[in-house]
Amino acid sequence: MRPGLFVTFEGPEGAGKSTQLARLAQRLAETGRPPVTTREPGGTPLGMRVREVLLDPALTIDPLPEFLLYSASRAQLVRDVIRPALAAGQVVLCDRYADSSLAYQGSGRGLDPAFLAALTGEVTGGLQPDLTILLDLDPALGLARAASRGQPDRLERADLTFHRRVRHGFLDLAAQAPERFLVLDAARDPDSLAADIWRAVQKRLRAEMC
Ligand code: TYD
């Protein structure tokens, strides 16, 4: 049995994560390894309900309960979807994961990173991605892209300084774990981004076979 491969996509709003995830999924399927694709918050019946709460612009949610709700969705997703798929040797592509909590609730909202890391360790049982694609983008650009897609959700309504802290939070996380992160400028042409992502995934898949 081949071991699985866990790949996450991270970045600020409107960076094109979902598009690149879909392109990678198609590429993997074409090479005979269709992945399991999922996202946070969401990916399970519980996660989808929690997602509605988290993105509802009518609600005011304090930073701590916000983090706990993301964590609730994550705990169920790891248990029901990600771990079983990896145990079956599959490739798992996840649109956002624990790094989003460290960037949004940590750097963005100001919760203590040590507390976030400790609780996330419990929530995920220590499961870390093998590869994290960080699509980096100036939040002013990303929010404009996201706004063109429709009404902003609760997080997209947060001010630009919040989103700037989130962006720098992601870049700091990448600097701390350069072997796990591939940082790409999301303003680049989507075809060349997809090519770079595919190269990085192929490298990991080859390493997994050895
Ligand atoms: P989504 O519509 O999936 O946004 P995107 O397409 O940008 O991923 O909404 C998820 C939102 O939740 C997004 O604004 C990032 C935020 N988020 C957190 O604040 N903390 C987290 O732990 C996660 C997973 C997401």
Image (cartoon, rainbow, N blue to C red):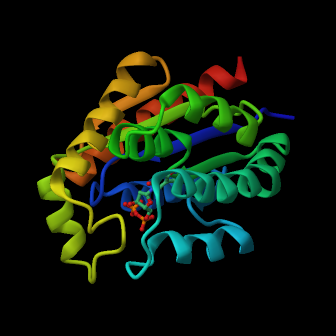
Q: How many marks?
A: 0
- Within the displayed image, which quadrant is ligand 1 positioned in? bottom left
Residue occupying the point 73% across, 74% down? 45
Residue occupying the point 81% across, 51% down? 79
Which sits in the foreground, 58 or 192? 58
> x%, y% of residue 8?
52, 43
* Residue 71 in sight in this render: yes
Quadrant where the image shows the N terminus = top right
Compared to 132, does 179 lie above or below?
A: above
> x%, y% of residue 66?
52, 57
- Say left or right for 175 vs 148: right
Quadrant where the image shows the C terminus = top right
Compared to 170, does 35 lie above or below?
A: below
Residue occupying the point 16% across, 54% down? 160
- Say left or right for 140 vs 110: left
> x%, y% of residue 147?
20, 74
The image quarter in which residue 49 lies:
bottom right
* Residue 34 in sight in this render: no
Which sits in the foreground, 66 or 9? 66
Compared to 73, does 124 lie above or below?
A: above
Which sits in the foreground, 73 or 205? 73
- Say left or right for 203 vs 119: left
- Say left or right for 162 vs 29: left
The image quarter in which residue 42 lies:
bottom right
> x%, y% of residue 151?
27, 83
The image quarter in which residue 140 lies:
bottom left
Residue occupying the point 25% across, 49% down? 162
